[in-house]
Image (tube, grey):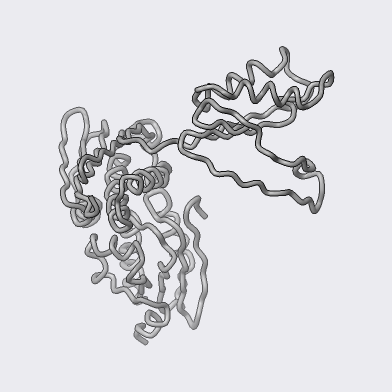
Amino acid sequence: VLVRGGSEASLLAVSAAPPLGTLAFPSFREVETTLAPGDTILLYTDGLVERRSEPLTRGLERLRALAAAQLSADQLCQRVTEALVPPGGGDDDIAVVALRIVPVERTLRVRLAADPQVLSQVRRMLRRWLEAHGALPDEVSALTLAGGEACANAIEHAYAPGSAYFELEAEHADGLVTLTVRDNGRWRAPRGGHRGRGLKMIEAAVDELGVTTSETGTEVVVRHRLRSR
Amino acid sequence: MSAHADLRFETVDGVVIAHLRGEIDMSNAGELGTAITGRVGGDTQAVVLDLGAVEYLDSAGIRVVYDLRERLNQRGQQLRLVVEPASPIAAALEYAGAARALGTAQTLQEALAALED
């Protein structure tokens, strides 16, 4: 089911094919459609819509009508499972996945676990946000590196990996991009030749770097003016 | 190897060539460094890090390169880096002041030719 802009729902013209894994050399037809920001695609297994007592089209239409609502992806899954899963469970397995194309926000604000594994996700978010705000490829690289280093710095401040959080904010006003990374850890002064390298790299990559430390944590602020704006 | 990077080895006349691909950061740099060190033997003349397909390299990755170089130099083994000038990581090495310090070559052939006997 494709939900356009969160209210208008239609069934995608997908042809029936054998279940995955049942044939050694199956063939599937690909279907392509273009999604716009805010659109949602709802994937489901047949257990959600099939009822022994009625034609399949009725079950599909019931799902389509339920999906035509202004809801978050989570709420959408909840709504269709609550309405369509029979009390005590169905006869068949049921799986529902809702994928939403999230529009790029004016301000990006996320709270993340202080775990090195989140860094690649941070870079993906920053690249997408920066591109949407008109940054040129070299500016995207420089700011992604600066943001990545600032986040890595916050992760290093956390005492136990995975148990603490940090915040990342990205703002854009009239060509000026500001990235702010806040953590609750205690500032550790750069030692030796290596610990200061991340901050040195941020300084070289962008216009301005500010580091504020207090009893409650550290705030790293990166400012950079985009050439294109 | 890691969710966003991979590593492939090739050995030519005592030179260990490590082809890296993907994104190198704090989450996988240590693991990659250990894997490369593990390939170096007493008869290894040099290590060439081919970073041609690396799209992201942060300070944690650069630190691993410095550590590797130090370890190799102690045993009289050489380290060379291959970084194309247009690569996104060329800027990162420049920001870290590491481009000149570590000595980069633009192609694998150039890196191999630059090795001292």
Q: Is residue A55 visible?
A: yes
Quadrant in which residue A90 is drawn? top right
Nearer to us in this view, B6 or A148: A148
Question: In which quadrant of the rendered image does the C terminus of chain B lie?
Answer: bottom left
Picture coordinates of residue A159, whole percent (x, y): 32, 35
Picture coordinates of residue A208, whole percent (x, y): 15, 48
Picture coordinates of residue A179, whole percent (x, y): 25, 41
Residue at 42% over, 79% down: B45
Q: Is residue B114 above or below residue A163?
A: below
The residue lying furthest to the top in this view is A87
Picture coordinates of residue A130, whole percent (x, y): 32, 47
Is residue A58 toward the left or the right of residue A183 in the image? right
Nearer to us in this view, A196 or A76: A76
Q: Is residue A196 visible?
A: no
Residue at 69% over, 39% down: A13
The residue lying furthest to the bottom in this view is B117
Quadrant in which residue B110 is drawn? bottom left
